[in-house]
Amino acid sequence: MLELIKLPYGYDEFEGVIGKDTMEIHHSRHLQAYVNNYNGLVEGTKFADMTIEEVITQIDTVDESIRQGVRNNGGGVLNHNIYFTQLANNVELKDGELKTLINDTFGSLEAMIELLQKAGATRFGSGWSWLVLNGGKLEVTSTLNQDNPLSEGKTPLLGIDVWEHAYYLDYQNKRPEYLSQIFSIINWDVVEERFNAAK
Ligand code: MN
């Protein structure tokens, strides 16, 4: 069974980029609902004892009667755990293997961020934009609803929530404006840790 993650910062930590109300509602209501719904679905099944990463990786093996619910709610938990744990003020991407690979793949960090912004802005409806590691290569991609790249065999390194609930109170309908600001609070140390664990 899953638990709501504790945030390593206060709800008001990112005022000016993401306001306190958005952070509080996003974490304590949206994410809590995904946790509760997921636990209700998998209770009494073998999936209750598995990590959320294991379940989402093998989503096609989940019993069809609960598969879509597990995909939506389990993905909702995993995606938000990725999102909330990768936020911090004033953490630059340091020189190292990840930075080198980003430069070799995309030209620069700024060019990669532009691709992530474009992937998020053009994702119709609700979903996520992602930096993933796929067979040792970096890729920018996006998913629909709460789908996670793990279900496609790709390891997520950075995930940007482009559901309206992630930005509406601060940016209303201006998703590109949110996407222009969110990269100022990325904890690149966490992204690098994920890369080092996955490579
Ligand atoms: Mn969200």
Image (cartoon, rainbow, N blue to C red):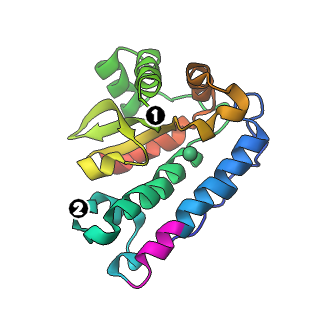
Residue 14 seen from this side: yes
Between 37 and 51, the residue placed more toward the observer is 37
Magenta span of residues: 37-44
Kind of residue sitting beneath label 1: Gly
Residue 60: assigned label: 2
Q: How many marks?
A: 2
Residue drawn 51% across the image and 44% down it: 190
Q: Amino acid at mark 2?
A: Asp
Q: Is residue 70 above or below residue 189?
A: below
CA separation, marks 2 and 1? Answer: 24 Å
Label for residue 164?
none
Other residues around mark 2 within 10 Å, as few (<14) / some (14–19) / many (≥20)? few
Q: Is residue 43 magenta?
A: yes
Query: Quadrant location of residue 63?
Result: bottom left
| Residue at figure coordinates x 29%, y 22% from the top left | 105
Q: Nearer the viewer, residue 2 or 191?
A: 2
Q: Position of residue 87 (x, y in %)?
A: 61, 40
Residue at coordinates 47% horizontally, 68% vertically from top-left?
A: 38
Q: Is residue 143 left or right of residue 77?
A: left
Identify the residue at horizontal 41%, vertical 64% (top origin).
Answer: 52
Q: Is 81 situated above or below 100?
A: below
Residue 176: image quadrant is: top right
Q: Which residue is mark 1?
A: 125
Give the quadrant of the C terminus: top left
